Amino acid sequence: MQKPVYPAFLAIIAAYQMSLAVITLYLPLFFHQRGYSQAAIGIILSLSPLVGVAAQPFWGTRADRSSSRNRVLMGMFAGSGLSVLLFYFRLPIAATLAVMALFTFFQVGIEPLSWSINLEQAEARGWRFGPLRMAGTVGFALMAVFSGWVLDRRPQTAFLLYCGLSLLGAALAVMLPRTPGHQRGSRRLSMILLMKNPELVGLLIYGAVLVMTLAFYYSFFPIYYQNLGATRTLLGVATLISALPEIVVLSFADRIFNALGPRRMIMIAGAALAVRWLLLYVLRDPYWLLPVQVLHSLTFIIVFFSITSYINRTVPKELKASGQALCALVVFGAARAAGALAGGCLAEWRGLRNTFLYCAVLAAASTFGFALWNRAAERAGRAKS
């Protein structure tokens, strides 16, 4: 029974990450081509995670109390795939913001809910996290190159491509084994209980700061790289280089997590981010920036793996979907909004290149602060034992 199910898990992860590659590469360039300023682009892109602040608790609670989380996931895939087509209309900025809000309402909850289902089913079957996430990495990398090549020739196909991949994800959600929420009975637990775990709170705050710097990168690196003379095809290659080394990291991620724990593991990402942003500030040749992209494999995926794995292993089963939604809300929602908005305004004032330097300083300072907090927490733990 297990073997036919496993390809469906791999396929839905790959489909989502492929759709993410398309929208990540193209959306900033799309708004840039529409003539929006960097500050305006920052405002529009910051709306996406801001909507997530309201959408994540809604989807997390709905999933935890649903008789089938699969149906909720299917609805989010379909909603995001169809709503993205509204971007084809040339709209005033107010209407563009409304479309962005609608698209985000459906899109923002897909990843935490899909991982809530995937991790629970994988744990029951003894599958490791790494190979599952690797399917997404490979899908993201291949689609980044393919979509870069296509968009250089037919940029108007971006939203159709995203729509097709999202509808594929909706179909695959039905093929997964039915996964009910664990609060559909009489026992109801509040998401507030999660905030009573100091280790989780520390991971969320530190992860949020790191993702703020990543949010600026995701929002403005395509524009910055193009300003340096890169084509969309070269941007796709840069994205491929950033994604493929994740395969190596994911091969050992479970072992690293077990050996170091989530706190020390996430500090690797913080140190790598500080170095990466500094190199983006120093280097100006688009080809010299290609090897710097390898550092991406030590950044986002480690932040994501550390926090989501910790939540899956420690929170009550009744709050697993809500726990992943909380992570998406704080780390990949509010933090991304703040990073995109503040980064856009800062770039308008000080320039894109200088903002990468400020990101390097923020990543280094937060990593130093988290290291001090971790050391104090470890001492307190030893004193109790």
Image (spheres, rainbow, N blue to C red):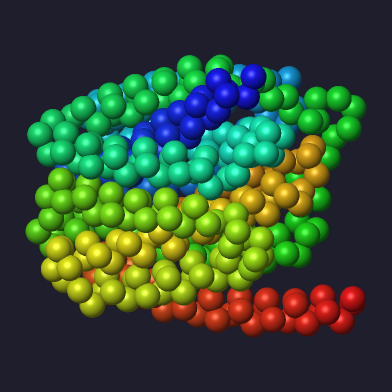
Q: Nearer the viewer, residue 50 or 114?
A: 114
Residue at position x 78%, y 82% from top?
379
Choose top left, top right, bottom left or bottom right for residue 64. top right
Choose top left, top right, bottom left or bottom right for residue 208. bottom right
Q: Nearer the viewer, residue 11 or 179?
A: 11
Residue at position x 55%, y 81% from top?
368
Residue 321 appears left or right of 369:
right
Residue 341 appears left or right of 40:
right
Please say whether residue 300 is visible from this viewpoint.
Answer: no
In the displayed structure, would residue 178 be above or below residue 47? Answer: above
Give the quadrant of the C terminus: bottom right
Residue 140 location in percent, x, y? 36, 41
In the displayed structure, would residue 201 be above or below residue 278? Answer: above
In the displayed structure, would residue 188 be above or below residue 219? Answer: above
Residue at position x 24%, y 54% from top?
238
Residue at position x 32%, y 55% from top?
242
**Numbered-mark total:** 0
Residue 310 appears left or right of 77:
right
Residue 23 location in percent, x, y? 33, 39
Please say whether residue 5 is visible from this viewpoint.
Answer: yes
Residue 171 location in percent, x, y? 48, 17
